[in-house]
Image: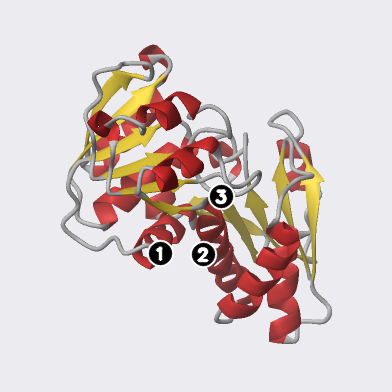
Amino acid sequence: MKAAVLGSPVSHSLSPVLHRAAYQALGLADWSYQAIECDEARLPALLGECGPQWAGLSLTMPLKRAVLPLLDAVEPLAAEVGAANTIVFTRGLRHGHNTDVPGMISALAEAGVGGGLGEVLILGAGATACSALAAVRGLGGKAVTVAVRDQARAHDLLAAAGQLGVEAQLVDFDNPGISAPDLLISTVPAGAADMFAKRLARPTLRPQLILDVVYHPWPTRLAVAAREAGVAVAGGFALLLYQAAGQVTLMTGKPPPVAAMRAAGLAALRR
């Protein structure tokens, strides 16, 4: 069986390492997983080329929202979030799923976040930010502040918040008056959160925990500044690991060998 991760750019993706490690641990010798460069324009044709030998696909930027109209069925969570990061092929039909949300919940739980969330600040308004909204809801949160570059382009995030029943207050990304949250989730690319790294030197913005979804390059300036300020940090590798584990189960029908996947991923990052 075949599987792959699609995105643009995608050559840096660690997903092939994680999925191949899972296949090896599960004894799935006839399974393969590759990275395929694919943008929104190419996506319909590529999906059309996936025949019965394909088990599923992982999706990264910029495809998580663009894929929805191309699917035959979308699970409720992916529909609420407005983003699917996983396609499973079943009897010729394309089923869309979102494993980013349970992956983020697992990553936060691993870092010590439980129910009863306090104030939450999310950086960014893309598909991963929408998944962060759902993760906050899954952990008992009901309201978040979202820092965005352009509030006029945050309509997808606001739509997701409405679907999820989460109150989302938008603030400008460079607003110096943002108060310190209990949890800060950065969903922006490496370097985009550097101004918040500088603010961590002041107690006005010093959360209890930061989740930075970036896993390479690591550590980010935000992660370094957080550690220097005594703030706990959860990196994007945990999110990547747990969302991939969810994909392995969806595609193979087997429990994911998380320990083997973690070891392979960390070894690849060290290299």
Does residue 138 lie above or below 133 as drawn?
Answer: below
Mark 3 → mark 1, Cα distance in angstroms: 16 Å
Image coords of residue 123 (percent x, y) = 40, 32
Residue at (39% x, 22% y) in the render: 148
Q: Position of residue 7 (x, y in %)?
A: 70, 41
> In the current view of this chain or complex, which residue is farthest to the bottom?
27
Q: Are marks 2 and 1 in contact (CB under 8 Å)?
A: yes
> Alpha carbon of mark 3 to alpha carbon of mark 2: how far?
13 Å
The spot of residue 228 in percent (x, y) is 42, 44
Mark 2 or mark 1: which comes first in sequence?
1
Q: Which residue is mark 1?
A: 106
Of pointers 3 and 2, the one earlier in the residue sequence: 3
Q: Is residue 12 above or below residue 54?
A: above
* Circle 2: residue type: Tyr
Q: Secondary structure at mark 1?
A: helix
Q: In the image, is residue 138 above or below residue 38? A: below
The residue lying toward the viewer, choosing from 123 and 67, is 123
Give the residue at mark 3: 85
In this rendering, which labeled residue sits more in front, label 3 or label 1? 1
* Residue occupying image coordinates x 44% and y 54%: 234
Front one among 219 and 50: 219
Residue drawn at (56%, 44%), measured in percent from left and top? 214
* SS type, badge 2: helix
Amino acid tagged 3: Asn
In the image: residue 7, left or right of residue 80: right
For image coordinates 58% across by 34% down, the residue present is 190
Give the image quarter of residue 116. Answer: bottom left
Q: What is the spatial separation of the Cα atoms under label 2 and label 1, in whole angstroms? A: 7 Å
Residue 242, which numbered label? 2
* Residue type at the position of mark 1: Ser
